[in-house]
């Protein structure tokens, strides 16, 4: 199971494109700041990582369009029944439900991306809580690997909305200061927004189209905790199963990996769960741990693809980038987070995502060596 | 492709059917089910479930019975997803203020939340996803379930569809396994809808119950379609 990434587009709280995000991650710079998109008076936080881009109409649709034009705009797209479109999101175009009386917050996004890429194969939205866009990548891998499709346009999108912000306040999951993954004094997550669009192809399709692979996705796995609706399994049972499944599908072992890109929400429970899982998967030797949510906030259903592109940028730079926001490692967490930029030539990473409902997903990513 | 439907159940405003002909899809919320298994018996860990999640757990319990399948995957299609709990939570915020939404209700404002409850109740450790493809959502979910079982990615998938807080609510679940009473195949796509009898997930239940081979196509005005056929008839 190996597919090539041949194009991408991204909008994050550090702006449009991967370069500004990569520069910020290298510098350990956070985009979490005062929330201006709406009023958060009386809530446990007034911070968020807002994308500094103008959009009109529905915000999620606007973010998706920006990322899609960057990913798709350079290529002529002939209609193809062997091209899929898969989008991961938790809330999609939520205002359509809350303000316009519609029941379906996803169909418009999916249909638009299908028309834009002239996909005539499988087209659908995938919901898996905060692992939604990772699950969408996994679904694309399976469609390509099984021979049903040659390529897939995969997206993750999430917009900031007062509804969701109030919900995370209700859950007491948000931090009053910028998120600090794996830090002794972490107090929760920072909300974020963004979108990313990937074009994934079989190696044969990329060669036939003379498109250079920018990276390779080698494996995918998913599993459920079956333990609790909101709290992750304390020992990371489900995430471990997902990571092991991803490694099996890539025909690799944990020792073949060079870094672990954590979900790293900076909630007390998530980071403890991931540390426990890492100890079980990687053993006492450990592995360098990276995380990006201190820099761009938690983008919920879009997090998987934003993490994937962040990780790809650092793999291609042959570097490890620091965990933004981490100042003092929680001594109870037996992990090896990256605290300063350092050279690192290992080409392969494991990327983890986890969500409510005990949903877990993992991807194996390798840079292109040529 | 070999995958079969071994059990199914459906719940609409007209009533509940476990195997056999599904109830008619009529306007309104799902009917009261007096014989529904009590949640305290089938999911004692649950705290304050949304009605949507409660109903799904109850219907899943009659499809799964006493079986606990290691690695069971869950895939449900829905266009409305969590629209009903979304509206309820939004009303709560309007009434009480932004800082006073109930956490137990917010948890259910994810389309995947009812399935998460099913996973906890029945120890389903496999992948869990919801699928949205307009009016083709439920059949799309069943097609992906067929793929997952046929390819060996999952030993079994509890799949189907639900709509909640719509003009005509329903829940419909199928258990897909490598071999079952009916062998089936499926495909999905976008654009021009292929030939086949038009129908939805409840028509699939009726077709399965009829004992005859079938070809069923669900299509949405936006272009999503999914098609399911019984290839080998009855085993």
Image (cartoon, coloured by chain):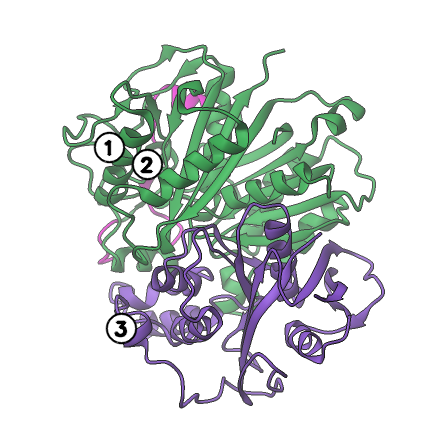
Chain colours: A green, B purple
**Residues at circles 3 and 1 in contact by the CB criterion of under 8 Å:** no
Q: Which residues are magenta?
A: A21-45
**Residues at circles 2 and 1 in contact by the CB criterion of under 8 Å:** yes
Instruction: Give the secondary structure at mark 2.
Output: loop
Q: Residues within 10 Å of mark 3 (few under 14, many from 20)?
A: few
Question: Residue placed farthest to the front in the image?
Answer: B235
A126, B152: nearer the viewer: B152
What chain does mark 1 sit on? Answer: A
Residue A243 visible in this rendered orientation of the protein: yes
Residue A17 visible in this rendered orientation of the protein: no
A219, B98: nearer the viewer: A219
Instruction: Give the secondary structure at mark 1.
Output: loop
Query: In this rendering, would B145 be left or right of A243?
Result: right
Q: Which mark is residue A264?
A: 2
Q: Are marks 2 and 3 on the same chain?
A: no
Q: Residues within 10 Å of mark 2 (few under 14, many from 20)?
A: many
Question: Mark 2 or mark 1, which has the lower sequence index?
Answer: 1
Residue at mark 1:
A182
């Amino acid at each position: 199971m190996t597919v090539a990434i041949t194009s991408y587009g991204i909008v994050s709280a550090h702006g449009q494109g991967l370069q500004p995000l990569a520069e910020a991650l290298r510098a350990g710079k956070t985009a979490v700041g005062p929330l201006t998109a709406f009023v958060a008076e009386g809530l446990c936080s007034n911070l968020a990582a807002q994308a500094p881009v103008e959009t009109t109409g529905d915000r999620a649709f606007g973010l998706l369009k920006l990322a899609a034009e960057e990913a798709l705009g350079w290529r002529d797209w002939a209609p193809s029944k062997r091209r899929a479109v898969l989008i991961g999101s938790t809330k999609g175009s939520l205002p359509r439900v809350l303000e316009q009386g519609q029941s379906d917050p996803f169909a418009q996004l999916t249909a638009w991306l299908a028309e834009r890429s002239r996909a005539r194969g499988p087209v659908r939205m995938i919901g898996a809580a905060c692992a939604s866009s990772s699950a969408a990548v996994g679904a694309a891998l399976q469609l390509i690997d099984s021979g049903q499709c040659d390529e897939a346009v995969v997206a993750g999108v999430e917009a900031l909305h007062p509804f969701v912000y109030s919900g995370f306040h209700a859950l007491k999951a948000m931090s009053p200061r910028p998120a600090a993954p794996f830090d002794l004094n972490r107090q929760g997550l920072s909300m974020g927004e963004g979108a990313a669009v990937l074009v994934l192809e079989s190696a044969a399709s990329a060669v036939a189209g003379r498109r250079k692979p920018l990276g390779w996705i080698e494996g995918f796995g998913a599993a459920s905790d079956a333990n609790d609706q909101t709290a992750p399994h304390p020992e990371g049972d489900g995430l471990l199963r997902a990571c092991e499944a991803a490694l099996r599908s890539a025909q690799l072992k944990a020792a073949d990996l060079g870094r672990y890109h954590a979900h790293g929400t900076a909630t007390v429970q998530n980071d403890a769960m991931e540390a426990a899982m890492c100890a079980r998967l990687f053993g006492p030797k450990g592995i360098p741990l990276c995380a990006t949510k201190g820099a761009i906030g938690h983008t919920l259903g879009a997090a998987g693809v934003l993490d994937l592109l962040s990780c790809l940028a650092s793999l291609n730079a042959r570097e490890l980038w620091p965990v933004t926001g981490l100042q003092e490692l929680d001594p109870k967490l037996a992990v090896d987070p990256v605290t300063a930029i350092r050279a690192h030539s290992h080409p392969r990473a494991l990327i983890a995502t986890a969500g409510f409902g005990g949903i877990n997903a993992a991807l194996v990513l390798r840079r292109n060596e040529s | 492709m070999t995958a079969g439907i071994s059990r199914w159940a459906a719940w609409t405003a007209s009533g509940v059917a476990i195997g056999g002909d599904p109830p008619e899809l009529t306007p309104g919320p799902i009917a009261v089910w007096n014989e529904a298994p009590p949640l305290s018996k089938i999911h004692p860990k649950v705290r304050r479930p949304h009605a949507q999640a409660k109903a799904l757990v109850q219907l899943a319990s009659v499809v799964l019975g006493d079986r606990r399948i290691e690695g069971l995957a869950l895939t449900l299609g829905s266009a409305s997803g969590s629209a009903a709990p979304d509206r309820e939570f939004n009303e709560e915020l309007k009434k009480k203020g932004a800082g006073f939404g109930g956490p137990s209700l917010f948890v259910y404002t994810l389309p995947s939340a009812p399935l998460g409850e099913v996973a906890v109740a029945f120890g389903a450790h496999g992948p869990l996803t919801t699928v949205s493809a307009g009016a083709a959502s439920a059949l799309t979910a069943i097609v992906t379930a067929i793929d997952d079982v046929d390819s060996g990615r999952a030993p079994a998938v509890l799949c189907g569809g639900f709509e909640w807080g719509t003009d005509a609510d329903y829940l419909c679940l199928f258990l897909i396994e490598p071999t079952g009473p009916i062998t089936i195949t499926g495909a999905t796509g976008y654009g021009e809808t292929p030939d086949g009898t038009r129908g939805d997930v409840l028509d699939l239940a009726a077709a399965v119950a009829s004992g005859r081979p079938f070809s069923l196509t669900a299509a949405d005005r936006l272009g999503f379609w999914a098609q399911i056929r019984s290839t080998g008839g009855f085993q």
